[in-house]
Image: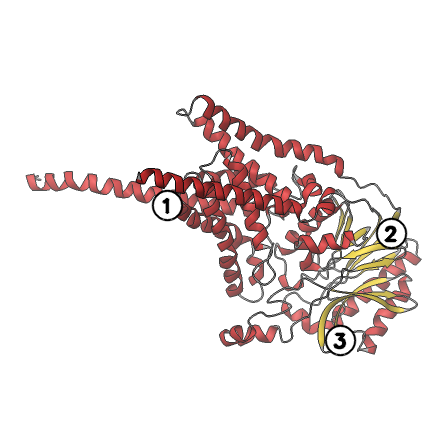
Amino acid sequence: MTVTATSVGESDQLEPRNAPGARTWARRLVPAAAAALSGLLLYVSFPPRTLWWLALPAFAVFGWVLRGRSWKAGLGLGYLFGLGFLLPLLVWTGVEVGPGPWLALAVIEAIFVALVGAGVAAVSKLPGWPVWAAAVWITGEAARARVPFEGFPWGKVAFGQADGVFLPLAAVGGTPVLGFAVVLCGFGLYEAVRLGLERRATGVVRHMAAAVAVLSLGVPVLGAVAARTLVSDKAEDGSVTVAAIQGNVPRAGLDFNSQRRAVLDYHARETERLAAEVKAGKVAQPDFVLWPENSSDIDPFANPDARAVIDKAAKAIGVPISVGGVVERDGKLYNEQILWDPAKGPVDTYDKRQIQPFGEYLPLRSFIGAINKNWTAMVRQDFSRGTEPGVFTMDGAKVGLVTCYEAAFDWTVRSEVTDGAQMISVPSNNATFDRSEMTYQQLAMSRVRAVEHSRTVTVPVTSGVSAMIMPDGKITQKTGMFVADSLVQKVPLRSSQTPATRLGVLPEIALVLVAAGGLGWAVGAGLRGRRAGDV
């Protein structure tokens, strides 16, 4: 082969041109891939897996990806992190209705994480950046829990920590403080690793950065250890024996709605079966019984047949039942819990306040109907919102009602406790989502709420997983999925309030103000830097 001068010259010219291009693409692709994969790692830390500790390396990698970058780069990398996390986390939303709503929800919710990424990138140049950055993350969660359409707090970092060492911090300041501690620890982990590999920083700067890294790692862990004194399952107001009924449904998916009478019959039958076991001395007599959400989608106030079925079950067990019904009143539809006395019938009600967009009501109905009429057909009539907390007095015990989706919202759970609830019930219906991870994600929320407010939490579900949760967050009994079953247990009643219950939204406001302070400092420092450069 003959090599010409021209070919040698061309070869020499091509290499220096191509090499920088390859390096440029690598510099872009590696952080992008790392952002998406760290989001995926955060998802893996969530239930039904008990790998809560994976949240720390997830945020450590996220910190590495964002530190020192421009806010524009942070916006894109944050979006990739959000997609890596939310796409698999929320896949259950498309189990029965197809991928469209699932993808739309994840794509929209990831915008909040993108904004967080921009904020973290901005504050990452500040001294003590892990603190500012963790506060920015909680600010993003606070916004996501409120807008659009009353918010969607699913996927809060705190909800992945039901099995973790940080869980007691929920009693200190609720989900914002618990989530802040986890994220701070993750960013602190990256800072500690960075300083271990960094050789250029010396003197005071290195010592200050090292102190921030140590404190970011140590303070959350020590705080969680100290907060264990707030966690107790000791009875303060005596105990009650509670029965949670899981009647099951004829089949999973959206079709369960067309089997409303069968679902009611199933729950009545399981209650009567339990009554027979009590009479035979096989099971303790419960003081009251809890049915799940949608256990009577036939309005018992308007349908004598449904009323008779519930009456028969209540008389068989001989104690009050909280029945989940769908009720129409004054032309309005309500997702309602009905306190059913075996002698008096219905004596009290609670109407769900935090109703689910696109499930219980349809925002932008005319616009969505123009896109897909099947979606409007699935939600033919919007549910109305309740306005008052729901605390039933059942055999002397005050039971706070938090219906399904409401468990994701801080304010709905707290309002029941501040209104006097000595224990909490989370009646739910997860049959629409088949055997997806949704039921386990929601169960973890209830465990966090138990510790947050130091209350027993019962979770009666139509199709599972139903559970009994002690005030320390431990599950003592649970059912399988898509089986008829009942849980009976003596549980403690408590009336003392944790700091989280007393403080309410104040810890979250404080962290938002910390984030605002850090972002203001970062913006001011950037403006001063540009002015100095112009001079």
Quarter of the image containing the C terminus?
top left
SS label for mark 1? helix
Q: Nearer the viewer, residue 280 or 308?
A: 308
User: Residue 26's image quarter?
Assistant: top left
Q: Which residue: 78% across, 66% down? A: 266
Q: Which residue is mark 2?
A: 241
Query: Which numbered mark, 1 or 3, is in the foreground of this view?
Result: 3
Q: Nearer the viewer, residue 56 or 72?
A: 72
Identity, as a three-letter code, of the amino acid under mark 3: Arg
Instruction: Give percent across and percent down for residue 28.
Output: 35, 45
Q: Earlier in the sequence, mark 3 or mark 2?
A: 2
- Badge 3 crowding class, 10 Å Cα cut-off, few under 14, some 14 to 19, many 20 or more, is few
Q: Which residue is mark 1?
A: 29
Instruction: Give percent across and percent down for residue 132.
Output: 53, 40
Which residue is farthest front? 535
Q: Is residue 160 visible?
A: no
In this image, 132 relative to 255: left or right?
A: left
Query: Which numbered mark, 3 or 2, is in the foreground of this view?
Result: 3
Identity, as a three-letter code, of the amino acid under mark 1: Leu
Q: Nearer the viewer, residue 401 or 310?
A: 401
Q: Earlier in the sequence, mark 2 or mark 1?
A: 1
Q: Which residue is mark 3?
A: 329
Q: Which residue: 85% across, 66% down? A: 340
- Badge 2 crowding class, 10 Å Cα cut-off, few under 14, some 14 to 19, many 20 or more, is some
Instruction: Give percent across and percent down for residue 33.
Output: 42, 45
SS label for mark 3? strand
Identity, as a three-letter code, of the amino acid under mark 2: Thr
Instruction: Give percent across and percent down for residue 57.
Output: 52, 38
